[in-house]
Image: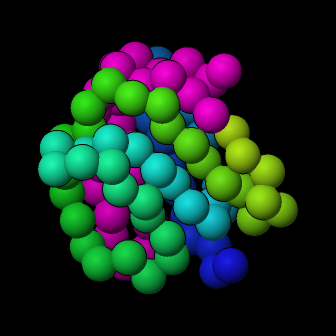
Amino acid sequence: MKNYHLIISTPDGNIFEGDAAMLTVRGSEGDLAVLADHIPLITAVKPCKCTVVLPDETEKIADIGGGILTVDSDKTTLLSSDFKWN
């Protein structure tokens, strides 16, 4: 699986910055997964379980209280005021 640069940030700073193979969250229109080469996107994120799949296929799961997800050609950024790894 191809990787991309992911940043997860809160008001306290970056929680995660590095390569990811996939990110799943619940957007304003429903559940979504971001893979490498995803089309550009900006969406609100609802409170949900967030899953980050790392390049080695390890999954990291977190509870997120909502936020904003931005997908660009060079990086994906998830901004949230409430993010806790499980």
Residue in the image at 56% along x and 61% along y:
22
The image quarter containing residue 86 is top right
Task: Looking at the picture, tell me which residue is in the foreground, 76 or 45.
Answer: 45
Identify whether 86 is placed above or below 24: above
Residue in the image at 26% along x and 73% along y:
40
Say whether residue 77 is magenta.
yes
Q: Is residue 83 visible in the rendered structure shown here?
A: yes
Quadrant of the frame with the N terminus: bottom right
**Bounds of the magenta span?**
61-86
The image quarter containing residue 2 is bottom right
**Residue 32: % across, % down:** 35, 56
Q: Is residue 68 visible in the rendered structure shown here?
A: no
**Residue 47: % across, % down:** 32, 25
Q: Is residue 58 left or right of residue 42?
A: right
Q: Is residue 31 left or right of residue 30?
A: right
Q: Main secondary structure of the magenta part?
A: strand
**Residue 21: % across, % down:** 63, 66
Identify whether 81 is placed above or below 36: above
Colour scheme of the rendered structure: rainbow
Residue at the extreme right: 56
